[in-house]
Amino acid sequence: MHPTTTRLAVACTAALALAMTSAALAGTTHYSGAFAQDDDLFVQSFTLTSESQVRGVTTSFAQGAFAPVLTVFGPGGLLVQEVGSAHVCGAGSGAADAATGFCWDALFDTVLSGGVYTLVLSQDGNVALGGSLADGFTHDGQPDYTGVAYLGLPGAKFINVDGRERSSLWALDLSIDPTHLPEPASLGLMAAALALSLVGHRKAPRASTGPGQAT
């Protein structure tokens, strides 16, 4: 294969691979689990290959669990966003909890540039201590801070601000939607362009020489 053709093929293949990798990142991932202590954290890193719409929403408070907080740290571990409950019911605020009637699930929906990010889920009141992930959280090392604060009972955990005991379960959906991905039709056009380029750059057959023809 001609060197020019080879370089073109590599470049087109790389472009297709990048687009397909970005496409693979799109979608929603569900996470769930249970905390053992009030100051536990769920930490999840994710990488964006391009600018993307990123949405994180919890669904566990509506099912009887503790009130959650979602904190996003960007490249370099710097704080990007921290959200708790909107404290209102309605579209985008989650379902109401049967016991309290509150809509205290956490939600963020924002556009982030490419890079490595870290999402942290914590219990209400346990928030970022500073402007970076390395600074830790306000209740690190306090495994029963809700029991002490809301009931005056050391050892009690997952106590809501109204004094109700909640479950330790948590559930989170993380959605990533790249905003600059080629449409499926565009991917097909790229593949077609690659094929045509390979054909167009094949080495032309050498013309035969005969009597009276220049070499």
Image (cartoon, helix red, strand yellow):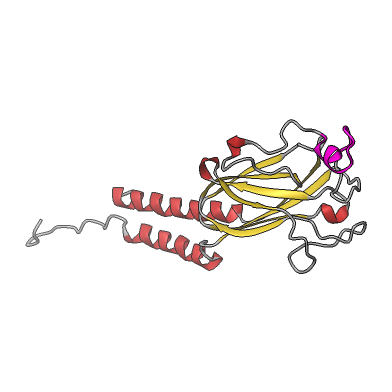
Q: Nearer the viewer, residue 2 or 32?
A: 32
Task: Reply yes or no: does residue 97 show up in magenta.
Answer: no
Single out the residue that lies furthest toward the left. 212
| Residue 133 x, y percent position in the rendering | 60, 39
Q: In the drawing, does residue 81 fall left or right of residue 36?
A: left
- Where residue 2 appears, as percent x and y from the top left, is 30, 49
Considering depth in this image, is 94 or 188 the residue closer to the camera?
A: 94
Query: What residue appears at the point 31 percent right and 57 percent down from the top-left corner?
Result: 201
Identify which residue is drawn at 83% across, 62% down. Answer: 95
Q: Which residues are magenta?
A: 144-157
Quadrant position of residue 156: top right
Counting labels gives: 0
In the rendered image, the vertical position of residue 141 relative to residue 161, given as above or below = above
**Residue 155: in magenta span:** yes
Taking the image as shown, residue 213 lies to the left or right of residue 61, namely left
Vertical placement of 181 versus 6: above or below?
below
Q: Where, quadrant-wise, is the C terminus in this rendering?
A: bottom left
Q: Position of residue 15 (x, y in %)?
A: 45, 54
**Residue 195, percent from left and from top:** 42, 60
The residue under the point 65% across, 48% down is: 71
Report the front residue among 5 and 126: 126
**Residue at the far front in the pictured view:** 152
